[in-house]
Image (tube, grey):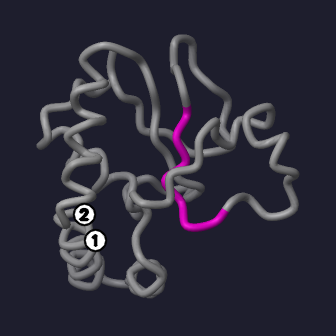
Amino acid sequence: MPVRVVQLGSARTEDEGVRIGTVRHPPRGVPREEFARQNWYDVWYPNLAPSAEAVQQALGAGTPAEWKAFAKKYRAEMATPENRHTLALLAQLSQHTNFSVGCYCEDASRCHRSILRELLDEAGAKMA
């Protein structure tokens, strides 16, 4: 019953479970009642999204060193007690049910969801 890390808006896989959007903003121009039907997400959870400042840092990261600086900042944001508790909860849930977390970015390697995958794995989540 693993956690899947997905691109929001992509086709769902079999047994994906609840899709959690870890983004700062809902998809533009999409009515709220269409979010799940259009494969964006079932639940919006912006708490796991990078801060607006960190998003800008990630978007401007043109070198590996700049991306590493963003990753460090996002990891620091996820180290707050509230976010550590959320990661621990998701890790525990992954032992018992299927669900997915995701973001809109096309390139997962240059998206916070790649770091979120690492954080969930480090918290003991069962990963797909």
Question: From what the image shows, is residue 28 above or below residue 12?
Answer: below
Residue sitting nearer the eye, 82 or 16: 82
Residue receiving disc 2:
78
Is residue 72 in the magenta section? no
- Image quadrant assignment for residue 28: bottom right
**Label 1, label 2: how many angstroms apart (C-alpha)?**
6 Å
Residue sitting nearer the eye, 54 or 69: 54
Question: From what the image shows, is residue 63 above or below residue 15?
Answer: below
Residue 107 lies left or right of residue 117; in this view the side is right
Q: Amino acid at mark 2?
A: Met
Write down the region rendered in magenta. 19-25
- Quadrant where the C terminus sits is top left
Q: Residues within 10 Å of mark 2 (few under 14, many from 20)?
A: many
Number of the front mark, 1 or 2: 2
- Image quadrant assignment for residue 11: top right
| Residue at image coords 17%, 61% | 81
